[in-house]
Amino acid sequence: MTYDNTLKYLVEQYPEDFIRYLLASDATDIQILKTELNQEPIRADSVTFLQTANQILHLEFQTLPASTPPLPLRMLDYWVRLYRQYNCDIEQVVIFLKPTTSEAVFVNEFTTRNTTHRYRVIRIWEQDPEPLMLSPGLLPLATLARTDSPQSLLQQVAVQVSMIEEAATKQSISVCTQLLAGLVFEPELIRQFLRREDMRESAIYQEILQEGLQEGREQGIEQGIEQGIEQGRQSELRLVMRLLTRRLGSINSQLQFRLQELSLAQLENLGEVLLDFASEADLMNWLNTIES
């Protein structure tokens, strides 16, 4: 999530830099499209619309090639939805960030019996860092580019960041650089060349932090609800088992297993009717009824 937010921020703040690097275009009349597409749920990492060229540049950033559904199918799905909505030329680029030997980072098409869909793939660790160091918005990505001396590259990028004149821009780019560099560099080395203080003071870092905290809270609430429901189900199961044992005697293991699979609502319903049972056969008939 941190890397997604960082790269979305860079694309939204510096779309010209990415367009110039990826499309060799100097278009300036650029509209940032919403990332939600028709027929939810689907969300693209970055969708940039070049209004003057009647073209969409769709960027997907991946730290790892693993994806569900598989990335090639996702790219086809994105293309179909974008084309249906905007009916214009669409250039799709997948940028892999973290070095890997996985064959998946060399796949650039989706193929099935009647359909072939292609898109561009960039493995950032194979790219020349020099073009990336020419624009503020691309500087953070330069830390991940091709080099025989990673430490020297990180130092060069840090020097370029320090030369940015506008203070707020320098601070934001410094933070983004530190966050992306964390994919391949140890924190101690990053701190040698870039100011850690920029993190705490930066608006983009605070935004990422707040989003992460909110996501954590939402996950915690969701997990808490799920845990609460499961705890309630287990308590109801223990109560029902005690009542059944008192009513019918020992319950055979097969029926016990079926009881353990019941939902909380089903256990509550069973608790209301079990006093009418006279034998295990009545319990079995009830279970067969709710499972049919």
Image: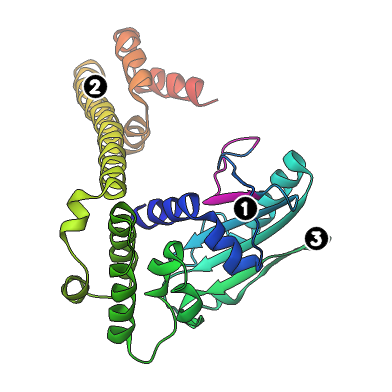
40 with respect to 101 (left or right): right
Residue segment shown in magenta? 38-49
Mark 2 or mark 3, which is nearer the start of the sequence?
A: 3
Mark 1 or mark 2, which is nearer the start of the sequence?
A: 1
Q: Residue 278 in the image: state x and y as whole percent.
A: 33, 12
- Element type where label 2 sits in the image: helix
The quarter of the picture where residue 82 lies is top right
CA distance separating discs 2 and 1: 64 Å
34 with respect to 286 (left or right): right
Q: Residues within 10 Å of mark 2 (few under 14, many from 20)?
A: many
Mark 3 or mark 1, which is nearer the start of the sequence?
A: 1
68 with respect to 31 (left or right): left
Q: Amino acid at mark 2?
A: Glu
Q: Is residue 182 visible?
A: no
Determine contact: label 1, label 3, CB under 8 Å. Answer: no
Disc 3 designates what residue?
Answer: 115
Of 153 and 245, nearer the camera is 153
Disc 1 designates what residue?
Answer: 28
Q: Residue 168 in the image: state x and y as whole percent.
A: 30, 52
Image height of 83 relative to 120, above or below = above
Q: Nearer the viewer, mark 2 or mark 1?
A: 1
Q: Residue 139 in the image: state x and y as whole percent.
A: 40, 68
Q: Nearer the viewer, mark 1 or mark 3?
A: 1
Disc 2 designates what residue?
Answer: 236
Q: Amino acid at mark 1?
A: Thr
